Amino acid sequence: MNNVSLLGRLTADPELRHTQSGIATTRFNIAVDRQYTKAGEERQADFITIVAWRQTAEFVCKYFSKGQRIALTGSIRTGSYTAQDGSKRYTFEVFADNVEFCEPKRDSSYSGGNSYNQRSYSQASNNTPVTAYSQGDTGDFTEMPSDEDLPF
């Protein structure tokens, strides 16, 4: 099974690009803190390349910017190529399937009108609602008021 979940911060603003056939794509990096630190040392991070396609790419480029926290699930893809100097290079990327916000909105300019968005609730102590994007049909989801008691 090839499944990965990551939570990190964008290292730069994602840029939307299109293939020759018009398919939207973006490639960006996130910094993911390591869970452990050695005594007396600073916390370290791993920088992971993420690739998103189609509506996921459009969503990321429209609503995310440098420094924002992002949660995603996807699959790992590895590859290799020969560099100009003749050395063999290896690649490691995560192809994102599902992308979610991890922080409240920064300003009120976001209207939430994107039909690929659905409401979910943060597991943080304040239970602030966040917007998520997932590939597939969101017609089965309904918005729950944040002041209503949840059944679980």
Image (tube, rainbow, N blue to C red):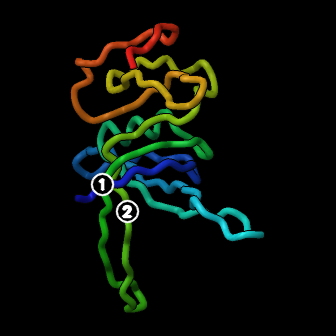
Residue 108: image x %, image y %? 60, 18
Badge 1 density bin: few <14, some 14–19, many ≥20, Cα 10 Å: few
Mark 1–mark 2 Cα distance, whole angstroms, equals: 12 Å
Foreground tag (1 vs 2):
1
Q: Which residue is mark 1?
A: 3
Residue at 32% in and 36% down: 55
Kind of residue indicated by mark 1: Asn
Ranked by sequence position, the earlier of labels 1 and 2 is 1
Label number found at residue 93: 2
In the image, 117 versus 110, the foreground residue is: 117
Q: Residue at x 27, y 45 (%)?
A: 23
Q: Is residue 32 left or right of residue 76?
A: right
Residue positioned 30% across, 64% down in the render: 77
Residue 50 - label: none
Using the image, determine if residue 5 lies above or below residue 126. Answer: below
Compared to residue 37, the image places residue 127 above or below, namely: above
User: Secondary structure under badge 1?
Assistant: loop
